[in-house]
């Protein structure tokens, strides 16, 4: 940001700051000077490095405020704000102009004033020198005032030739599909419906927040002007400017945020100067439309906290003085408490106590903060979340998985295949990612690409390649902009098979292995007492096989939480990605697993008496699932039963087609004495009867 030293001194008392002093003061306040350049008529121009959060310093008044507030050096200065002298008014503005702000959500405030009887001509010497001191070309007295206000206060503004506005109306709206606007000096552009324009009753007359239009520009024939000052949504202006590749002083400031509450003063200052240099008459009133005015924010700051953060003592009274000098209206309300009201020009970057502490440090001088040769470091144990990640990583590597780091972007075609129901892909408008402009809705996309890369390289591992990754997924709810970002643990493993293509048993084995990995990961975070519940279900996207997919839930401490799903990668996904061999994938929501850490365990006394184990083999339909068998066991609520487990599943010549034999092992125990076998027989008979009735099972002898 170029600053004229002569211009800067107009807002300081005493007005005697030199280039060297300004350099030292601003550097100590965190805004170093990049370069000293010779200006017009003996002036000096300072190139001030202004960070992106300090849009208030993109004008001479903002920089002068920083110099006046600084306590670096012996000289004390005060800020001299430009004096407002509202010009006399004539006819009501409503006689000339109508205003319609149709987009208050992206145009929080739009104001318009009308000046009649203007005489457009050369600028007076003071105005011309001010403009030319910063390398700008003087155009005419009316246009130069808009540039002067931008460089003085940091509030961009614009003037329209009233007689060139169709219908005597200004409409703030989005552009219509196919509309075009011819700008002042950036050519003609075809607009998108996401672009904001200021239009008259017929067509766009300026590209809102970026550049004025050619058709309504002020020239020597202009007699009535509309003076416009507004504020715009940061992202909307930035996106339009980048898409059209138009960079202007106005857009540069709007992209950093301008508070609507600063508009009134700056607009009044603008029309005052316009009337002075053009001899025009201001119409009575102002047209103003927009959203609700931001509320005044008050922040509390503790001097003791300030001293702790900065490492240097600053009294409460001195802090109040420093903050007031920066326009933060501050009051000492207690022994260790100050209340500060955030001024409009700082509302975009000051919202917390630590922000005010930074302001105190800058005003005192960053050099006042002590710099130690060494810093004390206290080693602390890892946080629970880090321990949980270490535990999960330990499980995965012990199970033969290799960790990967893959890209977050994917193609729209693949993304849509792995995008869940009622969700949409999140896209980025970036020419550098033409083939993959969408964020991944599933981490499995990256793992599958990694696996294909190994396939092309003919890499192999005994038992099949296994990879995992912890990363974020991105999506948004259909029809809205509500984004959904989740961090997930994703796993992918080959189906290990011997022939030309995998058999049913080999696929089942791979699914059971993945189930075991899930059990181990859950036990590492939830604890051994947690129970993993796998329920077959249709997948929510096309990445999983519709007939080999299940949801994963965890039952812990009396509640059941669904944490993800796993299953066979679908043939459609394999073909789209180019994967030759089948694979099993899994995605688990990481937050649920981390929240459950550390794993909970229950200590119990070892049994004092031996128990009895009984096996029961059930011949059931192939479609019967293990969770259904478990449901029968739990429904029986067998007396003195202390557990059950699966022994195995048998299919063979002895079992007819479409059937399978499931063997489960029941465990019984009495805590007070040794059980006898005849005491267990009734429970086994009860279980067998329930299996016959509920599962249509046959008892295999």
Image (cartoon, rainbow, N blue to C red):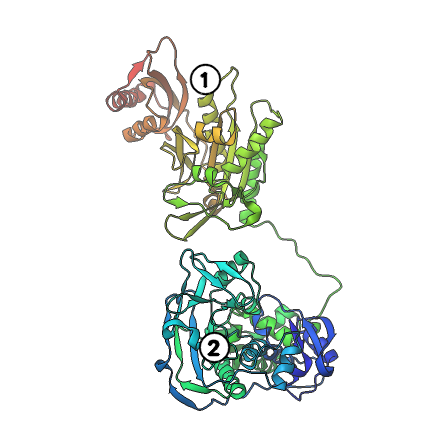
Task: For the residues labelled 1 and 2, say whether their Cβ atoms are less than 8 Å apart.
Answer: no
Closest to the observer, 462 or 50: 50
Residue 454 is tagged as: none
Quote the CA–CA distance across marks 1 and 2.
73 Å
x%, y% of residue 316?
Answer: 58, 80
Q: Name the residue under label 2.
A: 263
Camera-side residue: 499 or 642? 499
Describe the element under mark 2 as helix, strand or loop: helix
Image vertical order of residue 426 relative to residue 241, above or below: above
Number of residues whose C-alpha sits closer than 10 Å to that of mark 2, classed few (under 14), some (14–19) or many (20 or more): many
From where the camera sits, is residue 11 visible? no
Report the quarter where the N terminus lies. Answer: bottom right
The residue that disc 1 covers is 503
The residue lying furthest to the front in this view is 221
In the rendered structure, the answer to whether residue 393 lies left or right of residue 298 reads right
| Quadrant the C terminus occupies | top left
Q: Image quadrant of residue 76?
A: bottom right
**Which one is nearer the viewer's eye here, 504 or 653?**
504
Relative image position of residue 17 (x, y in whole percent):
70, 83
Q: In this view, does 403 lie above or below 30?
A: above
Label 1 SS: loop
Report if residue 160 is visible in the image. Answer: yes
Label 1: few (<14), some (14–19) or many (≥20) C-alpha neighbours in 10 Å: some
Kindly identify the residue that appears in the image at 35 percent across and 25 percent down: 625
Counting residues from the start of the chain, the first of labels 1 and 2 encountered is 2
429 vs 353: above or below: above
Q: Where is residue 418 in the image (x, y as percent from the top left)?
A: 44, 38
Q: Identify whether 672 is placed above or below 652.
A: below
In the picture, measured across the screen, residue 635 lies left or right of residue 566, that is left
């Amino acid at each position: 940001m170029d600053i004229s030293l002569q211009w800067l001194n107009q807002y300081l008392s005493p007005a005697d700051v030199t280039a060297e002093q300004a350099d030292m003061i601003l550097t100590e306040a965190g805004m170093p000077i990049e370069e000293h350049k010779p200006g017009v008529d003996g002036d000096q121009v300072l190139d001030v490095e202004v960070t992106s959060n300090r849009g208030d310093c993109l004008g001479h008044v903002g920089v002068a405020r920083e110099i006046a507030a600084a306590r670096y050096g012996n000289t004390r200065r005060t800020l001299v704000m430009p004096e407002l002298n509202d010009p006399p008014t004539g006819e009501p503005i409503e006689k000339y102009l109508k205003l319609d702000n149709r987009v208050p959500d992206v145009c929080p405030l739009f104001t318009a004033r009308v000046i009649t009887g203007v005489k457009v001509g050369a600028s007076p010497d003071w105005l011309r020198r001010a403009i030319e001191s910063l390398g700008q070309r003087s155009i005419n007295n009316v246009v130069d005032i808009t540039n002067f206000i931008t460089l003085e206060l940091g509030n961009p503004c614009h003037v329209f030739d009233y007689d060139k506005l169709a219908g005597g109306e200004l409409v703030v709206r989005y552009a219509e599909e196919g509309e075009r606007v011819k700008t002042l000096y950036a050519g003609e552009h075809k607009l998108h419906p996401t672009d904001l324009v200021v239009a008259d009753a017929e067509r766009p007359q300026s590209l809102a927040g970026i550049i004025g239009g050619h058709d309504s520009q002020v020239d020597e024939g202009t007699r009535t002007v509309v003076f416009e000052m507004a504020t715009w949504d940061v992202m909307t202006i930035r996106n339009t400017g980048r898409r059209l590749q138009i960079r202007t002083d106005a857009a540069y400031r709007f992209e950093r945020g301008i508070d609507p509450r600063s508009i009134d003063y700056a607009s009044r200052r603008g029309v005052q100067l316009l009337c002075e240099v053009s001899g025009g008459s201001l119409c009575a009133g102002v047209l103003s439309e927009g959203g609700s005015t931001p509320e005044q924010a008050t922040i509390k700051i503790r001097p003791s906290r300030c001293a702790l953060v900065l490492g240097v003592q600053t009294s409460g009274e001195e802090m109040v003085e420093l903050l007031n000098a920066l326009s933060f209206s501050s009051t000492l309300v207690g022994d260790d408490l100050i209340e500060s009201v955030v001024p409009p020009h700082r509302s975009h970057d000051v919202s917390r106590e630590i922000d005010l502490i930074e302001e105190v440090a800058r005003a005192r001088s960053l050099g006042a903060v002590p710099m130690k040769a060494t810093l004390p470091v206290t080693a602390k144990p890892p946080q629970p979340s880090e321990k949980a990640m270490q535990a999960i990583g330990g499980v995965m590597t012990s199970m033969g998985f290799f960790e990967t780091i893959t890209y977050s972007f994917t193609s729209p075609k693949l993304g849509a295949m792995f995008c869940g129901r009622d969700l949409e892909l999140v896209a980025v408008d970036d020419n550098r990612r033409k083939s993959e402009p969408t964020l991944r809705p599933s981490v499995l996309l990256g793992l599958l690409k990694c696996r294909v890369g190994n396939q092309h390289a003919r890499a192999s591992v005994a038992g099949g390649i296994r990879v995992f990754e912890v990363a974020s997924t991105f999506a948004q709810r259909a029809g809205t902009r509500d984004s959904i970002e989740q961090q997930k643990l994703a796993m992918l493993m080959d189906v290990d098979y011997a022939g030309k293509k995998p058999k049913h048993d080999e696929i089942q084995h791979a699914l059971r292995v993945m189930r075991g990995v899930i059990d181990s990961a859950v036990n590492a975070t939830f604890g051994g007492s947690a129970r993993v519940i796998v329920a077959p279900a249709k997948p929510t996207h096309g990445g999983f096989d519709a007939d080999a997919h299940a949801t994963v839930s965890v039952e812990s401490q009396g509640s059941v939480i669904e944490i993800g799903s796993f299953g066979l990668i679908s043939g459609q996904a394999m073909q789209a990605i180019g994967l030759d061999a089948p694979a099993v994938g899994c995605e688990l929501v990481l937050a649920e697993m981390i929240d459950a850490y550390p794993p909970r365990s229950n200590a119990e006394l070892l049994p004092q008496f031996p128990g009895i184990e009984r096996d029961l083999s059930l011949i059931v339909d192939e479609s019967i699932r293990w969770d259904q068998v478990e449901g029968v066991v739990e429904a029986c609520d067998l007396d003195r039963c202390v557990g059950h487990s699966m022994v195995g599943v048998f299919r063979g010549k002895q079992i007819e087609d479409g059937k399978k034999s499931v063997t489960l092992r029941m465990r019984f125990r009495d805590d007070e004495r040794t059980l006898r076998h005849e005491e267990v027989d009734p429970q086994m008979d009860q279980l067998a009867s329930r299996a016959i009735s509920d599962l249509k099972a046959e008892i295999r002898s």
